[in-house]
Amino acid sequence: MKPTAKISCRNLWKIFGPDPEAFLARHNGAPRSEDFRTAGMVGAVCDVSFDVFPGEILIVMGLSGSGKSTLIRAISRLNDPTAGNVLIDGQDLLKASPEELVDLRRHKMGMVFQHFGLLPHRTVLSNVAFPLEVRGSPREERESRAMEMLKLVGLEGRETHFPRELSGGQQQRVGIARSLAVGPDIWFLDEPFSALDPLIRREMQDEFLRLQKMLKKTIVFITHDFEEAVRLSDRIGIMKEGRLVQLATPEEMISRPADDYVRQFTKNAPRDRIVSVGSIASAEVAGSAGDAIPASLKIGEVAARVLASDRPIAVVDSDGQTIGSVSRDRMIAAMFPESRP
């Protein structure tokens, strides 16, 4: 049975320009690209619908101007959508009063952005405790919680430092600790690592995965880096001109891209770390079950073994049942699809 969605977006629109609601109504809620151009309007988010389930990491990506950052701001109502519905645990965010919205942000949502947004005149401890201060928590309680968060992100001992005394990666850790201080169920991250050097970025991705393994947040994460998306996501959504072109697992997206735009995004993807053996196995049964390869393994994990074999090798499911086989030719085709005639 599929779990109930933590976040549900239905027919979400964010249009920039004069009187966007009237514009949408004039076109029966379905304006075309030429309608936007004629009216001088910008469709930043166009009729987007999707669900995010508890504990899931959904990564949204696209080229600059595709609408991905506008989408995350619409979901959190940092920008009010033009039309549609955003449900958080079944509560319609677009119908929430200002007081209800403040309460949701203070208790259910954590946000991390590309620019760390730390307060330069406050210490690391004070920065992390700030959202709890806004919430009205007593000083001892908020500082104790802030210390817990600093320990969680590996910054214990830096609590009296100021942001200017930290590296970029350390500053982003402070931003992450601050967003987690209120104990949010939902975590919104908008290109949180893109301003970091490659080695620090990789380190922060490792930290993110470590934290998620412990905390199991429901996450919407924006990036323009497909390799980062593959490494961190459960599912990926790709946007183009405000529309959600495809929403799928990394493997589904590589195996069955929705169109040429998605195909270009996945062109240089690390297929060896994404494509599973089961997805490339033929129905033909060959080899013995004793020498079999589990269908769940990624092709990069077994490529050397398959390429060294002069005969197909059996592939088994999680119950040990043979479901087919994988041959040298199929492995080459999977790893180097552009080499196929």
Image (spheres, rainbow, N blue to C red):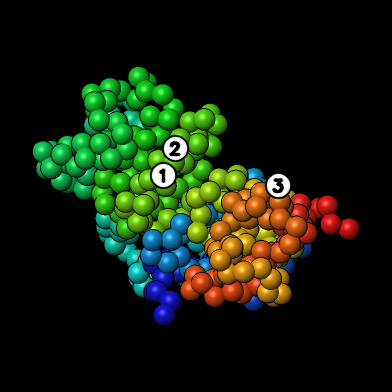
The crowd level at tag 1 (other Cα within 10 Å; few <14, some 14-19, many 20+) is some
Q: Which mark is residue 204?
A: 2
The crowd level at tag 3 (other Cα within 10 Å; few <14, some 14-19, many 20+) is few
> Considering the numbered disc 3 on the image, is that residue within a helix, a strand or a loop?
loop
User: Exactly how many numbered labels are in the figure?
Assistant: 3
Q: Quadrant of the N terminus?
A: bottom left
Determine whether 154 is above or below 76 in the image: above
Which mark is first along the chain, 3 or 2?
2
Quarter of the view holding residue 35: bottom right
Name the spot of residue 104 as percent of width and height, x first: 30, 59
Residue name at image x 65 percent, y 52 percent? 305
Q: Closest to the observer: 106 or 263?
A: 263
**Residue bearing mark 1:** 208
- CA distance for labels 2 and 3: 22 Å
Determine whether 277 is above or below 323 in the image: above
> Considering the numbered disc 1 on the image, is that residue within a helix, a strand or a loop?
helix
Name the spot of residue 324 as percent of width and height, x first: 65, 72
Which mark is first along the chain, 3 or 1?
1
Horizontal arrangement in the rendering, residue 200 relative to residue 266 (left or right): left
Name the amino acid, label 3. Asn
> Considering the numbered disc 2 on the image, is that residue within a helix, a strand or a loop?
helix
Residue name at image x 60 percent, y 46 percent? 227
**Residue bearing mark 3:** 268
